[in-house]
Structures are given as structure tokens and as C-alpha cells.
């Protein structure tokens, strides 16, 4: 079984959405990430691990770099950046929009990328 790092509920402010006011005023987005990584557990060396802080910073960078109209595009951009920057074999990114204008808890999109 491949070791998996999970980061849940990373809150990042962004100016994403279809409506002009969403892009103007911005809102919070919640990210849930699953990263398939090498077996740093065997070596117990930080050099063999993925730094969670750097992953969180990467998500923030992608979110701040541009305003996305669709959650699908935002999630894909985050997944692509993680697979490019970190030694992971696969990544799953779920972006939740809790302040969606529907009678639901949130809207969400999930995207997966793999080196395979």
C-alpha cells in the first residue's frame, strides 16, 4: 500500500467564481488534499518526505495567481502544480466552496492527477 498524506480543510481566500461580485469581493475555499508519496516512513528522514507547509503554500500561490471562473479549473490547476513541484506519484484535490448560493452545506469538485 502506498503511503498517503492527507491535508484536510486548508482554508484559502480566493477571488473565484462566475459572478462578478464573487470575483470582486472574494470568499473562502476549503481544500482537501491526498498525496501518494514515497516511503519516508522507512528512512525516517525529512529529506525523503513532502513538506506539508510547502504544499499549503503551493495551494495559496495557485489560488492567488489568478481568478478562476470554475471550481473545476481551480482544482485542476492546484493538482497540476502539486504533481509538478513535489515528489508524489498521485494527488487528489477537492475544493469546497462553503458559501455557495444554494441550500446546501457546500459545493465541491475533485480532481486527480497521476504520474502513471
Image (tube, grey):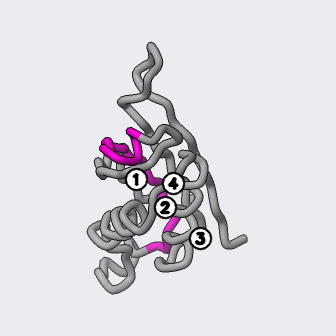
Q: Are marks 3 and 1 in contact (CB under 8 Å)?
A: no
Q: Secondary structure at mark 2?
A: strand
Indicate yes or no whether the magenta region holds residue 36: yes
Q: Secondary structure at mark 4?
A: loop
In percent of the image, x 57 and y 45: which residue is there? Answer: 110
Q: CA distance from mark 2 to mark 3?
A: 8 Å
Tell me which corner region of the image, top left, top right, bottom left or bottom right, holds residue 65.
Answer: bottom left
Label 2 or label 3, whichever comes before in sequence order: 2
Residue 89 lies left or right of residue 57; in this view the side is: right
Label 3 or label 4, whichever comes before in sequence order: 4
Indicate yes or no whether the magenta region holds residue 84: no
Mark 4 or 2: the one toward you: 4
Q: Are marks 2 and 3 in contact (CB under 8 Å)?
A: no
- Magenta residues span 21-39
List the residue tagged with mark 1. Answer: 6
Q: Secondary structure at mark 3?
A: strand
List the residue tagged with mark 3. Answer: 89
Q: Quadrant of the C terminus?
A: bottom right
Mark 3 or 4: the one toward you: 4
Q: CA distance from mark 3 to mark 1?
A: 14 Å
Q: Are marks 1 and 2 in contact (CB under 8 Å)?
A: yes
Q: Tell which of 82 and 19 is nearer to you.
A: 19
Q: Residue furthest top?
A: 103
Q: Secondary structure at mark 1?
A: strand
Label 1 or label 2, whichever comes before in sequence order: 1
Q: CA distance from mark 3 to mark 4?
A: 26 Å
Q: Quadrant of the N terminus?
A: bottom right
Mark count: 4
In percent of the image, x 50 and y 62: which residue is there? Answer: 78
**Label disc, if present, on residue 35 of the rendered structure:** 2
Amino acid at each position: 500500500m502506498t503511503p498517503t498524506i492527507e491535508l484536510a480543510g486548508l482554508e484559502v481566500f480566493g477571488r473565484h467564481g462566475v459572478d462578478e461580485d464573487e470575483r470582486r469581493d472574494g470568499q473562502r475555499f476549503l481544500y482537501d488534499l491526498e498525496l501518494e508519496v514515497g516511503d519516508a516512513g522507512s528512512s525516517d528522514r525529512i529529506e525523503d518526505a513532502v513538506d506539508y507547509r510547502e504544499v499549503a503554500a503551493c495551494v495559496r500561490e495557485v489560488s492567488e495567481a489568478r481568478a478562476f471562473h470554475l471550481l473545476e479549473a481551480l482544482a485542476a490547476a492546484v493538482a497540476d502544480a502539486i504533481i509538478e513541484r513535489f515528489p508524489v506519484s498521485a494527488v487528489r484535490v477537492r475544493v469546497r466552496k462553503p458559501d455557495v448560493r444554494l441550500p446546501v452545506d457546500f459545493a465541491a469538485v475533485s480532481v486527480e492527477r497521476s504520474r502513471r
